[in-house]
Structures are given as structure tokens and as C-alpha cells.
Image: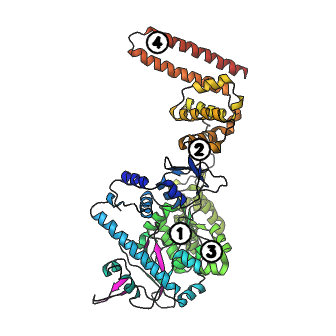
Amino acid sequence: MSIRNEGNIFDYILDNVNIIDVISNYITVERSGKNYKALCPFHNEKTASFIISEEKQLFHCFGCGAAGNAIGFITQYENLDSIDAVEFLADKYHVDISQFSKGANQKNTSQHAKYYDILRDAAVFYYKNLRVHPEAMLYLEKRGIHMDVVKQFGLGFSNDAWAELLKSMSQKYSTKDLESVGLIIANKDNTSYYDRFRNRIIFPIINPKGKVIGFGGRVMDDSLPKYLNSPETEVFNKSQTLYGLNLAKSKLSDKKQLIIAEGYMDVIALHTYGFTNAVATLGTALTADHGRLMRRYADEVIICYDSDFAGQKATLRSLDVLRGLIDKVKIIVLGENLDPDEYLKKYGSDKFREKIDNAITATEYRINHLMQAYNLNNDQEKIEFLSKAVLIIGELSNAFEKNLFIDNLSNQLQVSRELIAQEVFKENYNANSQYGFHTKIKQQDTVVKLSSDRKRYLERQLVTYYIHKFDTLDETQKLLISQFNYTTELQEIIDYIISYYNQHQTFNMQHIIENADLSISTGLVEIIHGHLDHIADIDIDHVIHNLMLLNIDEEIEALKLLLKGAEVKSDLQHQIKNKIIEKQAITLKIRNHKFKN
């Protein structure tokens, strides 16, 4: 979708959806004072700290810090980028955003919407068809796919007929559109059409926004081709699509880890056994576009392909593709020429979890795979292996990792560590360093950084002390605190807290979170978290005196500015003089206070 003005479309969506409606579709919210509260969906908690302001159309979690508007909530919860989140909300709440496209793009947007409708209706057709064909249901049952999984993935069935889908769908859509989305094929003479998928289990392919964009079909016998996918269309590109991502994206834990397998059945098996972060390519090799797509959702990718020769080859190719795209890539080695579906059925989820926990790095996999091609009991072959292995290790950017692999090879092959290190580090090898690390680490002096904004720091100490030690303050201290000129961001918070204590006997942060303006409650939480651990060390008299000095300095500077433009200067000069005397008196108090303590 081509957006004419991103700022406008964002504002337009936010003006047409209510954040309470959006969030309440995902979690239970309840009114609390002027705001709404809920258990945060982004971290585990027992006490509601997730606050939603209908007035400001914003949310904020005081537990994990998640915050934003309705679009921000969808981007986090549905794992979508901002443009996809806008389109998701527009579709869900029937907001017409076609005005933000123009010309051919507006036409394409309208056409794509029609294609999505066709593909959705086709998915419903296949799903209903499965329910009335016991032979297809029996096949799935034998594969361990029960009705709950059928519903979860929207699985269906295509009859062994030439034009059943065509007859059903042509009542609503043109043959041209049905052909455009890959559901039907013209015969050689272009005189008629027939269904692309016949006598196959159907796997709807759904994008991260929940739109059906294509289908995969699998035979139930040994006929070929075993799998058949939709062709490339305006809404479906195999090199940019991952099967199961629509489900996996919302199941990712804080670890942000994706498992990538090779096919539909592997993904379904993994999800069935509890590994809901599994996705797969669609009958095509992993591409850079796949890597970039996974990077949007995960920090770590675990490759879990078949253990046969073809699977090993695909793994090596995938490692090359993901290099530079995904920082953390690991590989599960299943063994016994098993694929993930077969391994899970044979050994179960606990053993597979062990495989995940023991997944190896890309470098380890490359070296292990290389090792299989050599007889390491033969000195000549050992030399050939080492000459290639050091090249693999040399590609690592981290010297510590290089050192670990050097140690491993040295121990495993009984070869001098120094010789391997020389080959790995080449011209960067230093005889005075141990495999890339200096034997003596230069000690650096600890540098204590003082806050560049002393006033802001003191104000935050004051707020923390005022909240938790209110009863220990005398009336003079309270009066001084109420009369200070605070920095802009804290003035509103101080005013609120002073007003709060005029109405309440005790401080209740949860009450403030649920009832105060979000900016106030957010600021308070940040301040308290930053200073609460050090409250016993706060010398309130010292803080007050220093803030008095800073306030006097500000007043003196203001008077000096007035003095420059004043015609009669004597009164202003007298005020400045008095302020300087006042400053000297407070400075003396600070010195005496410091001497006493």
C-alpha cells in the first residue's frame, strides 16, 4: 500500500477507533476512576498495573514500561509494523483509508481487497468440504491432526473433481479474478477452466495481518507432486511468506525466538506439541526476504530441517542467507534422517525441548558438517580439514568465540593451539597474546560521572522523600517545598502530590496510577524507581538548602536581565544585593550542616 501522508493516515485511524474498544478485544479491562485498568498482556503480573486513558487515548504499563496509542498496542500485541497495524485496524473497524492512496495504487488497494475476499471464501469452501469427506478426516487423524488443530490452521479438502470450486465460486466472482488468485487454471485451448487443487488436503496460507493469501495442497497417497502451492500473485509471494507466522507472532515469549522448519506438516506438528513459535518456508529455499521478515519478530532463529542429506544442504545454504541478517542463529540436529514431525511422534516434546536447549551455533554446525567429509585418523586428511576449519573460525568477528573454537579443535585433534591460532588470526596474531587476547588487561580508572542537571536530580530526591517521609517533615520544610520553582516536567508532579496530601492521609501509588493523568503517574513511577533504594541516604535539609541556592541563582539571573533594559536601576540592584546576601547565608548553613554531620 502506498501511503500519501503517513502522519495523516495515523491520525485518521486514531480519530476513528477508540483505544478502549481496541484493547478490550484482547484483554479484560475495567474502569478505575478516570482511567481503565487491566492485567498487562506484555508481562506476567497479578496486580493490574496496565492503565488506559480514554481521554488521552493512550496506555501505559507501570510494571514493564510498555506504552503507546491504539496503533502502538496492535504493533506490540500482533507483532506488526506500524503500516500493517494501520491496515489491520482499518479492516477490523471498517475505516476507509483508500483516500490515502492515489491513482493506480488506490485501484490496486481495491483490487487486493477483492482478492482477499475471494481467498477467504475459498478457505471457507475447503474447510466445509473437509467436514463432509470422512476419508480426508481419517487421513488427518492418522497423522495426529485432530479437529482442534484443523480449526486452528483452517485446514480443508479439495474434491477429486475438476471444477467443483469453480462452480461454487463463479456464482459470486469472475473467472478472471479466480484465475488471478491462482484458484483455477485455463485449459490448453483457453476455452474452459478447472480447479488447481484436486483431491488434496488444503493448507490456507495466512499473512501476519490474518489475510488468506494462498494455499498449499498435499496428496493423501504417494502420487506426485506431493505438494502443490498457489502460484505467485499480486497478494502472494513465496519468497516473502512464512507458513504459520500468523499464529507464531502472537505466541512469542520474551525470548523472541522462532523455529524454522521446511513444511506445513512440520509446523503443524510443532504447534501441536506445544512449540507454537514454529514457521516454515513454502516449498522454496530460505531467502533474504524471509530473513528480514523473521528479524521483525525474533532475535533468535533456530533452524530445524530434516536430518537427511538434502536437509543438511538446505541448512548450510540457510546459514549463508541469514548471515548478517539475524544475529543469533542456532541449529537443531535431529539425527536418524528424521524430520521434526517424525521426531516428535517418536520421542515426544520433552526430548525435542532438550534438542532446542542443546541447539548448536552456525560455526559449530559448519565445522561438524565439514568434519564428516574427512578421516581424521589420517594425517593428510586432518591437515586438509584444519585448513578449511580455520577459514570458518576466521569468519567470526568475536575474538572470544574464535578462541573457544581454537581450544576445541586443539583438544579434539591433539594439535598445537598456537599453530591453529596463527592460522586463524593470520597477520593479527600476536605472540604476546593468547589466541587473540592480551595476557594483561589494562586497568581503567573508574570515572564517577556527576549529573549535568543538578537541580533536576535534587528535585527527584525531594519528591521521593516527600512521598515516603511526609510525616517527618516540619511545617517550615513543607512550606519551602511548596514555594520552590521546579523544572517544567516536575512542577506538575509536585503540585499534584501537595494537593494529594491535602486530601489523603497516606500515600497510595496504585490509587494515583489508576486516577491521575498518565503523564503524572508515569513521571512518579520513574522518579520513585530511580531513588527509592537510596531514600535512607537522602539528607532532606541538604536537598532543600541546595534547591534554595539554585532558585536564588535563577532569580538573580532574571533580575540581571531586567537590569539591562531598565531605565531606573537602583531598585533592581538593591534586590540583587539582597539575593546575594540571602545566598551567602544559606551557603553558611550548608557548611555548618555539613560540619555537624
* Disc ID at residue 515: 2
Where does the magenta region start and end? 183-212
Mark 1 or 2, nearer chain start:
1
Of 216 and 477, nearer the camera is: 477
Amino acid under label 2? Answer: Asn
- Observer-side mark, 3 or 2, equals 2
| Disc 3 to disc 4: CB gap under 8 Å | no
Amino acid under label 4? Answer: Leu
- Observer-side mark, 4 or 2, equals 2
- Observer-side mark, 1 or 2, equals 2
- Observer-side mark, 3 or 4, equals 4
| Residue ID for mark 3 | 273
Amino acid under label 1? Answer: Leu
From this view, report whether residue 507 is shown above or below residue 257: above
Viewed as shown, does residue 51 lie left or right of 216?
right
| Residue ID for mark 1 | 247
* Residue 396 visible from this viewpoint: no
The local secondary structure at tag 2 comes to helix
Quadrant of residue 484 in the image?
Answer: top right
* Distance in Å between CA atoms under marks 3 and 2: 44 Å
Quadrant of residue 398 in the image?
Answer: bottom right
